Amino acid sequence: MSPDEKICAVKLFLDGKGSQRSIAGQLGISYQSFQQWIRNYKSMGKGIFIKKGRKL
């Protein structure tokens, strides 16, 4: 899933356009994973979803 898709999903929830469970289900991810995305976004902003550096 791309960073933009993750940001969009979190914003849908924060804008009141779906529950955590419904959005997680639509994305095919666990409810707990989506909760973590929301916590990360709230504490660190959208930059948290953008990968930095390269993995070998």
Image (spheres, helix red, strand yellow):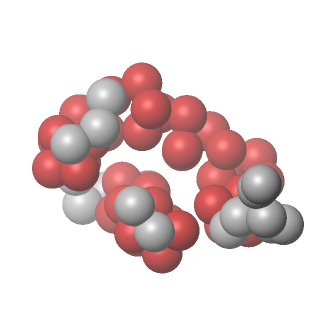
Which residue is at a point 71% across and 64% down the rendered structure image? 51
Tell me if I can see residue 52 in this picture.
yes
Q: Quadrant of the N terminus?
A: bottom left
In this rendering, position of residue 49 left or right of residue 36: right
Which residue is at a point 64% across and 53% down the rendered structure image? 41
In this rendering, position of residue 23 left or right of residue 5: left
In this rendered view, identify the residue nearer to me: 1 or 23.
1
Q: Is residue 20 above or below residue 42?
A: above
Which residue is at a point 42% across and 24% down the rendered structure image? 32
In this rendering, position of residue 48 left or right of residue 19: right
In this rendered view, identify the residue nearer to me: 20 or 28.
28
Tell me residue 36's x, y (percent): 55, 34
**Numbered circles on residues, count:** 0
Tell me residue 37's x, y (percent): 54, 44
Q: Quadrant of the C terminus?
A: bottom right
Tell me residue 27's x, y (percent): 23, 50
